[in-house]
Image (tube, rainbow, N blue to C red):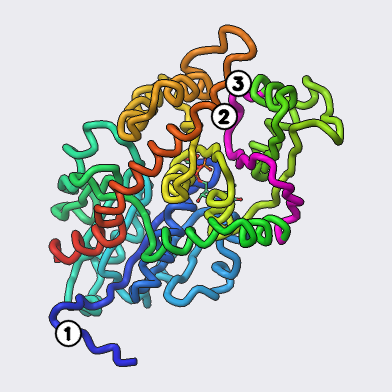
């Protein structure tokens, strides 16, 4: 295959993506998905990360260099003069979620006598990739320049890049062909096969994926699923969700083998398998940022456990998302309880809407997904943005 570029196909670029893991998996999850998506589109990526351990299960092979086009590097290497001296200069720098590139790294580039980068450019397009929100400020702040006032890059400009749900934002990560690929799991046999391969003996119960922090309403929900006549199988993600369910069961008591609620604890899945899991289930509980986006692509009813902030700033962010989703009142109410915006007035008012309103919940997710499919995805927009700034 020829690698020659025509005037309409912009040359592939070299990207440095920087990621610091604050907690949980979302920072790395997003930075990895972006890296892999760029590489699949022919770009080359160096992913500098302070704790890459979760990639062992999120993207098996990534740490061993098995993903063509992506090189995972330790953050500390970005501070070492000897590792910087021979580094091919990148065309783009991405700071994931406000993590700041080490001054040593910036200085090495700013003061270097390097020849211009592979595309004839002396300084990279520098982007701060922000957190996802549906709040109104996102459209105002997206793509704004931020002049660098001090340090070795003084006089250069960074740009804010905001993911989002509307055309005035940077969009959402969505690899080409993703939604079509997920549709294969609509077939009951494919789904059964996938579940069996992952140790789930599915006998047509209502399937629920649970990826959450420690929701206060969890006990009540488990209790109700265990008490209602219809059968539910809960597929619980590894880590905090598993711990939360096990803690709840110490209060509620163990489930009997013939309980209508059966629980399977999943091992950590790769991102690809995680996406497939969401497509298999009838209802998806997700959290943070990246899994929310994946649950939208899955097109199944979803409940979001938002990442909590000390000053309750997440309440406005939650309501903004529910607005974007045009969530029916029962789904809004369920989110308020699940996220502790309000507490359960009495037991018995949490799971009772689930069967009744599930169709409306599903329609809301699918309508949002269909709107989003009309927009360019984040990687496409990012590449276009960089091309314009060069
Ligand atoms: O893990 P999260 O809660 O992550 C984050 C972080 O807390 C981050 O600091 C915060 O900024 C952000 O939330 C808002 O949830 P999230 O964002 O959904 O990330 C989880 C990632 O882990 C996602 O990429 C999917 C992946 N994953 C797997 O690949 N396999 C699995 O089995 C599971 C459970 C998740």
Q: Residue furthest top?
A: 345
State whether the magenta stretch is mostly helix, strand or loop.
Answer: loop
Establish if 158 lies above or below 2: above
In-front residue for pair 153/65: 65
Any atom of ligand 1 within 8 Å of the CB at mark 1?
no
Q: Residue at x 68, y 39 (%)?
A: 234
In-front residue for pair 272/257: 257
Q: Residue furthest bottom?
A: 2
In space, the residues marked 2 and 3 are separated at their CA atoms by 18 Å
In space, the residues marked 3 and 1 are separated at their CA atoms by 57 Å
In space, the residues marked 1 and 2 are separated at their CA atoms by 54 Å
Which of the image's four quarters has the C terminus? Answer: bottom left
Foreground tag (1 vs 2): 2
Sequence-first tag of 1 and 2: 1
Residue 211 magenta-drawn?
yes
Q: Which residue is mark 2?
A: 355
Foreground tag (2 vs 3): 2
In-front residue for pair 239/164: 164
Q: For this view, does 24 lie left or right of residue 178?
A: right
Q: For this view, does 51 lie left or right of residue 97?
A: right
Q: Which residues are magenta?
A: 197-218
Circle 1 SS class? loop
Q: Which residue is mark 3?
A: 217
The answer to whether marks 1 and 2 mark residues whose Cβ atoms lie closer than 8 Å is no
Q: Which residue is mark 1?
A: 6
Q: Position of residue 23 (x, y in %)?
A: 53, 41
């Amino acid at each position: 295959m020829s690698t020659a570029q025509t005037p309409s196909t912009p040359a592939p670029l070299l990207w440095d993506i920087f990621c610091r893991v604050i907690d949980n998996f979302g920072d790395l999850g997003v930075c990895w998905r972006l890296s892999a998506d760029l590489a699949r589109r022919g770009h080359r990526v160096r992913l500098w990360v302070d704790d890459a351990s979760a990639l062992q299960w999120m993207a098996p092979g990534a740490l061993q260099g098995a993903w063509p086009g992506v090189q995972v590097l330790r953050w500390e290497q970005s501070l070492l003069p000897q590792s910087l001296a021979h580094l091919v200069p990148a065309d783009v720098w991405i700071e994931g979620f406000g993590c700041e590139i080490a001054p040593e790294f910036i200085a090495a580039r700013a003061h270097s006598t390097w020849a211009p980068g592979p595309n004839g450019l002396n300084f990279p397009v520098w982007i701060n990739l922000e957190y996802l929100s549906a709040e109104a400020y996102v459209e105002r702040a997206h793509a704004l320049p931020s002049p660098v006032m001090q340090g070795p890059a003084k006089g250069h400009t960074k740009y804010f890049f905001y993911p989002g749900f509307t055309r005035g934002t940077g969009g959402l990560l969505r690899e080409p062909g993703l939604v079509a690929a997920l549709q294969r799991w609509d077939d009951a046999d494919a789904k059964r096969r996938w579940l069996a391969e992952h140790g789930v003996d599915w006998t047509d119960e209502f399937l629920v994926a649970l990826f959450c922090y420690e929701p206060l309403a969890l006990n009540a929900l488990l209790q109700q699923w265990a008490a209602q006549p219809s059968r539910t199988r809960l597929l619980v993600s590894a880590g905090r969700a598993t711990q939360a369910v096990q803690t709840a069961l110490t209060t509620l008591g163990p489930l009997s083998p013939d309980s209508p609620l059966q629980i399977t604890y999943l091992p950590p899945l790769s991102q690809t398998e995680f996406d497939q899991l969401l497509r298999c289930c009838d209802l998806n509980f997700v959290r943070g940022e990246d899994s929310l986006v994946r649950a939208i692509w899955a097109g199944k009813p979803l409940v979001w456990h938002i990442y909590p902030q000390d000053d309750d700033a997440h309440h406005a962010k939650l309501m903004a998302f529910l607005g974007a989703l045009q969530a029916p009142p029962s789904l809004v109410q369920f989110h308020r309880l699940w996220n502790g915006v309000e507490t359960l007035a009495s037991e018995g008012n949490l799971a009772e809407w689930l069967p009744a309103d599930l169709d409306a919940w599903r329609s809301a997710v699918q309508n949002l997904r269909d709107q989003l499919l009309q927009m360019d995805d984040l990687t496409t927009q990012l590449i276009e943005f960089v091309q314009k700034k060069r």
